[in-house]
Image: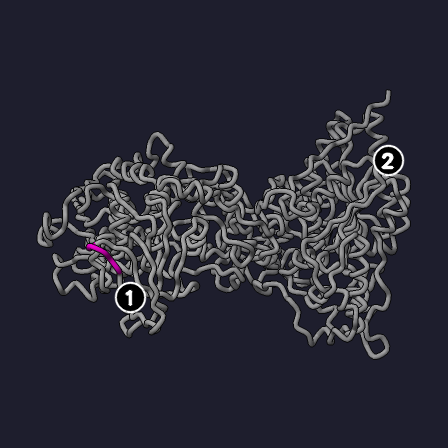
Amino acid sequence: MAHEVVRQHLPLFDEDGRSAAVDGDAGRDLHYLPDFPEEDPYQAGHRTCAGCGPAIEYRWVLKAAGQDTVMAGPTGCMYVANSTYLCTPYTVPWAHTPIASGGSFTSGMAAGYEAMIRKGRHPGPYPNIVVMAGDGSAADIGLGSISGALYRNHDALYICYDNECYANTGIQVSPTTPYAGMTTFTPFGKAVPEGKTLPPKNLARMMAEGHPNCYVATTTVGYSVDLMNKTRKGLNHQGAAFLHCYTPCQKGWVYQTSMTIELGRRVVEAGLFPVWEYDPEERKYHYFHPPVQRPVTDYLAMQGRFGHMLPEHVASMQMAANRNWEDIGMDVPDELRELEDPERHKRLADEQYSMPLNRGVGA
Amino acid sequence: MSVRGTRVPEHLRLPIAGVTPPPTEQDGQRLFPTGNFRFFRPVYKDKTPPCNNACPTGEQIQKYLDFVKHERFLDGYLTILEDNPMPSVTGRVCYHPCETACNRKDHDEPIGIRNVERYLGDYGLQLPENPIKAELPELGDKTVAIVGSGPGGLGCAYHLRRLGYRSVIFEAMSKPGGMLRGGIPHWHLPEEILDAEIAKLLDLGGIEIRCNTRMGEDVGWDELRNYDAAFLAVGQDVGRRLSVDGADLRGVGGALEFLREAGMGRPVKAGKRVLVIGGGNTASDAARSAVRIGGGTSTIVSLESADELLIVPEDLEQARDEGIEFKPNTSVVRFLGENGVLTGAVLCEARLEKDEHGNVVPQHVPGTEYEVSCDSVLIAIGQTQVLDWLPAELMERGLVKADEYGRAQGHVFVGGDVTRGPAMVVDALGDGKRAARNIDVVLRGEGLAPPPEVEVMPYERLNTAYFKHAPRIEAPMASPAERRRDQKVEVTLAYSKEQAVAESDRCMSCGVCNGCDNCYIVCPDVSVMRDTRENGHYSIRTTYCKGCLVCVQECPTGCLEKVPEMDFDEPEAVTRMETAFAPYDGAHAEQSAFTKGLIEEAIAASDAARRQSVNGSNGHAPAGSNGSRGATS
């Protein structure tokens, strides 16, 4: 006799009044985070770099998912740094998959658990199945397998932690590397002064447009409650869910280790990484409108990988950001519109920008 | 990858899947103590918020706002009482230097601290029992004489009581309170609130107030010396006279005397057309009281120009709402009268000039004289005090001399207006607190020392990304028409509970950890532990903290700081990793005993689990299971 497959339901956290999911003045001006669970299935003792963005994202995702979770990780920096000699920091089951097969492996896990539960061979509810693939795996080498898994609607959460390069092998260009982002494969020079000439692949939009049955969302490490709530929404969604998460890479982008979270906020405030949610029930996008709109230079100037940019490159980046603002239904202030003109810029390295308060350079 | 069934020589025994120690929630992955990446360590160092620093009594404002935002009103009230005995009073009358200093003014608008304080003070007055009474120390045998029962004297008596000293307060008036009663009108501070606060103070025991006892007449300087110590807080309640023609006409009087008579509950009269001479807060209070009592109009005649007025802005605005008129840059030439009764005044345009001592020297503009009619004049051009009973060597320019500790001589301390000229209630309360602490020090035979230096948190060092813009909740007010009706109608009204909580919630907790959990959640290395969390006390797990300083950068309040690792002398803080993966001697280094032990434990646990699973599933002893593991120890 077939057993029933019981799904878990994870309650959402209260918004803290400054989270990305809150639009406008909702919520109290509360400076306290909600009570997060004590457990950390992603534990200390991993060998990521100091201030690692993906490590923060891993911790938040697993904190939100809890102990009844099974996870897979295709090859990427978070596979290498977390499992040297296979000494992992996970207190939940974890499996490594080849870089191309994150999606197919997870499909198998999901189908396997459903079958085992139906046959009474797995006690307890259906576990949270999470695969966290880097942008190299999710947007490039393993794109096909993840797309397949989303299309077949296996009940699992597919996360792309996007550090905008192949960091594992020493910072090579990936499809999500931003325009003008310098990597070892896109150095700047006389022939190609901007470094990378191509715009980044719009992965999350691709996933949402291409798999309208899936819950798809984007988020950044700048917004902890938002990231954890979107993780839980993705896990609660019956069927495939895809989360595209912006996670700064200190070594690849060349910034001060302490600025990881600040970058996560600024990329949204500069209009370069729209944060949204796609609801498959309504077939609608819900956009987060950040309270601050900044010129892109506020974001670019914090990172060494953009240090070579010339006025026309900065202006072109601003144009892309302005189109993003329009896409998500926000007005573009005149001062940002004017910055589409290269005449308004100097070389990025020569100009003074609004840098965040710096409380010190870390390790 | 499994190595089961193969022989792994002892010296090649690597920590590999199946036999590596798994991480635990408690200890992390112990094979990799990543703390040795670290150059800087985050350290919690609370600083002084600007509000706390600006308050003369040193109220821990951030702390009680934090209690209020969690609706812990009793804790909030007790926090105020550590520094200020009468929050109901200061919550109404204080000119709030805290709000002026509040960092939130650079963000949007300062916090309504005074109104929250008033909410807590009124909350405290509602309590059936004074919550600090049970925790006071036993009264000792030492008694301190205090001259004056104004805020300075009462504050000193309160803090002395908290330290276990008795006190006797000499008060010249028939009721205690000093300027609180005789200088501040009822519409600012209702009499019953003041009475309740004084009653609460007297209820602590060990404090005696002797009213109708004037220094120099009923008690002399020498009698004060009979006490173990003394605190002089006589204030300045004598109004300065104006030396112009007609100043002795009936209808010309001092504003202070007017306010005192009204405050003491004696019948007072005010005319229908009142002129108030002066440009300070007393002038404003007198003018506003006069329209309440006389029902007519008041005009404030000041040498100061409209933007030089020394009236605090909110009072000025309220006065304008109530229809008080202003004649700035104007001086009185003479008063006019008939049969010794005032009928009018001659005014002229003038400028404010000061001589080298700071004395006011009005500069009249000749030919601009004009007449106005009036039936009452109140003079508010400054205050002084009669101090002829004091030894002359203690005086200087009409004030009492004191050193940096507020000490006049020996065990005699001094504070309040009589040391600095007219100032705020909270200044006097602060002097009282300082005097009590210093009296305690000298009576214990120790030397006075200046207070420790504090580091004040500036706005620029907060991480303002975490603070949404939220407007200040203004305190509700009685309507101007209602206010003019009676001098017992309170002008500023109280916050509701919800308003008090919401306003406290705007506090940015500058420089002080408020347990917001931000450092805890942003740590990539699970190294900020909140197991010791008690209103914001976290510990840093130095074994794993890599020193990325994300927590320091993201701390909203700025209480986290980086400290170079070399400043710490803790050889055991991090297990050094030089040997974690040395498979045999010479490749990297020798495998440390700690690492070896971890791996051996893991192997034993793995073997035990395997044995158990074989036993459990097959129900018989594992044949040959010893050999399958390769080399076992």
Q: Residues within 10 Å of mark 1 (few under 14, many from 20)?
A: some
Q: Is residue B465 left or right of residue B607?
A: left
x then y, percent, for residue A8: 74, 32
Residue furthest to the bottom: A190
| Closer to the camera in the image, B151 or A299 | B151
Q: Is residue B84 left or right of residue A306?
A: left
Q: Real-space Cα distance between discs 1 and 2?
A: 100 Å
Q: Residue at x 45, y 47 (%)?
A: B63
x then y, percent, for residue B302: 35, 62
Q: What secondary structure is the magenta-colored segment mainly?
A: strand
Q: Residue at x 67, y 45 (%)?
A: A225
Secondary-structure class at tag 1: strand
Looking at the picture, does residue B422 appear above or below residue B8? Answer: below
On the same chain, marks 1 and 2? The answer is no
x then y, percent, for residue A224: 66, 48
x then y, percent, for residue A307: 73, 72
Q: Is residue B529 left or right of residue A244?
A: left
Regarding residue B20, the answer to whether it shows in the image is no
**In the rendered structure, which amino acid carries the disc numbered 2?**
Ala
Secondary-structure class at tag 2: helix
Residue furthest to the front: B338
The region drawn magenta spans B336-340
Whether the magenta-drawn stretch holds residue B339 is answered as: yes
Looking at the picture, does residue A340 appear above or below residue B119? Answer: below
Circle 1 sits on which residue? B333
Q: Residues within 10 Å of mark 2 (few under 14, many from 20)?
A: some
Whether the magenta-drawn stretch holds residue B416 is answered as: no
Residue A111 tag number? 2
Q: Residue at x 84, y 26 (%)?
A: A118
| Closer to the camera in the image, A94 or A221 | A221
**In the rendered structure, which amino acid carries the disc numbered 1?**
Val
